[in-house]
Image (cartoon, rainbow, N blue to C red):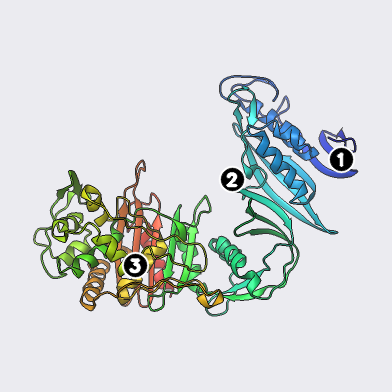
Amino acid sequence: MNGAAKSAVVGGVFLAMVGGTSYGVYALVGDENGGGGSSGGARTASEKGSGPVGEKEAAATAKDFLAAWAEGDGRKAADLTNNAAAAQSALGDFTAKALVSKAVITPGPPTGTTVPFAVAAEITYEGVTKPLVYDSRLTVVRGLTSGKPLVDWKSSVIHPELGPSDTLRAGAPASPPVKAVDRNGEELTAEKYPSLRTVLAQLRETYGAKGGGKPGVELWIGPGDGNGAKRTLLTLVEGEPSTLKTYLDAKVQAAAEQAVAKYPEASVVAVKPSNGHILAIANHRADGYDAAMTGNRAPGSTMKVVTAAMLLDRGLVAADKPAECTKDVVWGGRTFHNLKNFELPGATFAKSFAQSCNTAFIKPIDDVRDDAALSKEAREVFGIGLDWKTGIKSTDGKVPTATGAEEAAAYIGQGRITMNPLNVASITATARTGVFRQPLLVSPDLDGRTVATAERRMKPGVQQQLVSMMRLTAAGGTGTRAMAPVGGDKGAKTGSAEVDGAGSPDSWFTGFSGDVAAAAMVEGGGHGGDAAGPIVASVLTSN
């Protein structure tokens, strides 16, 4: 503390005074009658120890750290962490850049080495003060070289929404606020549609300055380098927003939000095949990652939509012609199996598609005689890898050229192929109409974006057979149970993608109904119809 600071213990509560104003209040924890632990005894935070950190050690270290933070002594607090440089910088920014004028920090009872705490802060900017209240937590670990119990430093100690490279800032942001509305003019807010929080932040960052609005004063979370979307935590002075029209549909978005909420690590995207407009984007993930738009996971058998199109395109299969579906097949020195080693003697290619027979898709490889055939089909017809510019950050699917066993794996959506729900929804939309239309969240006229176009459209005969096989999958194949609630003209494809080290495969599902195509992915969700299927069905029935 500097010379202007005073401190005292009043009634068992730590009160810090900085510059004559109350900065922090810290309620003591870990006294003789509280906490307790199986190891560590009553050792203080400064003492060296060995073995696992005990609950009393964690409580004592947390007490010292939070008290120093409440005092405004960033150096002292940082020295009680395992990354003093990063901690001191962040703690200093808490007052200097987040403009915290007062903070009351109240710890809760420890659970093992984790100590929760509540922060009641005030943010002051040019005479305007607003409260900010939130909960966070810290974990205490043993210092690798010192042996001392130390706070395991993470940015989220400062605020739970801070990522590793994020910072907390207050002031007048460069981008004015925007009022994002759906295709029918209904306002879209992060409070009503939580999955759109990062989407709305990106839209503001990109288009806020183009709409004529005026910035207010805010507290926000953003990348440490200042580049990229910001997430507003608190508004001190309201700005004047401009209205930004998106192609989202509030009704479909609401259904997507509700559907993914039923499954952990779930994501879904819906698009209109007739024009590529994105109707919904939803994620339910603990890490806040936008897997729907930027994920890159093996898509499993949903990739068979592209593989089937390529085989049909080259005349190597036909929906009504036999396609040998054996229990297994060896290619490139590796044996590939069907789920539970099923086989379909005498089955047509359409039935093999509907029942997701892996071997029926791998056996024709020798007749293709082109290692790049699948990547060509994906790029030239389905627009995969053409650098889509949707209006926010999105990741293109990847279908690299492969040989041997890796080529066989690619034909069934494994190997080095990566996709996300946006990519797979677009694949289904292309199959539905025979024409690739790049997905769009907002009009390209807003900023003159170049929209990707595919080299060629799907042959009419290929498109007709592909749609008929997807209809069969929904009506009498692996997608039947999931698509049962969906009425009218409908089609689907299931997928399960094995991931190294995972106990359960990723669940993938894609389908169409009318002029809506959707795709969902649930990490570790099992087979395609188990988790991703009901999500897609919920979205399709909302339209």
* x and y, in percent, of residue 533 in the image: 35, 61
The answer to whether mark 2 and mark 1 are in CB contact below 8 A is: no
* Residue 484 in view in this figure: no
Label 1, secondary structure: give it.
strand
**Which one is in front in this view, the residue at disc 2 or the one at disc 1?**
2
User: How far apart, in angstroms, are the residues tagged by discs 2 and 1?
Assistant: 31 Å
Residue at horizontal 72 percent and vertical 24 percent from the top:
32
Marks 2 and 3, how far apart at CA: 34 Å
Counting residues from the start of the chain, the first of labels 2 and 3 encountered is 2
Q: Nearer the viewer, residue 407 or 343?
A: 407
Of 479 and 494, nearer the camera is 494
Q: Nearer the viewer, mark 1 or mark 3?
A: 3
The picture places residue 353, in percent across and down from the top left corner, at 21, 63
Of the image marks 2 and 1, the number of the one nearer the N terminus: 1
Q: Quadrant of the N terminus?
A: top right
Q: Quadrant of residue 344?
A: bottom left
Give the residue number, with chain letter if any, for mark 1. 17
- Whole-percent x, y for residue 144 in the image: 58, 25
Residue in front for this viewpoint, 478 or 429 = 429
> Of label 1 and label 3, which has the lower sequence position?
1
Horizontal and vertical percent position of residue 427: 34, 67
Cα separation between marks 1 and 3 = 61 Å
- The residue under label 3 is 427
Residue under the image location 26 percent in, 69 percent down: 470
Q: Nearer the viewer, residue 8 or 174?
A: 174
- Circle 1 residues within 10 Å: few <14, some 14–19, many ≥20: many
- Dot 3 amino acid type: Ile
User: Residue 73, can we see it?
Assistant: yes
The residue indicated by pointer 2 is 164
Up/down of 456 relative to 28, above or below: below
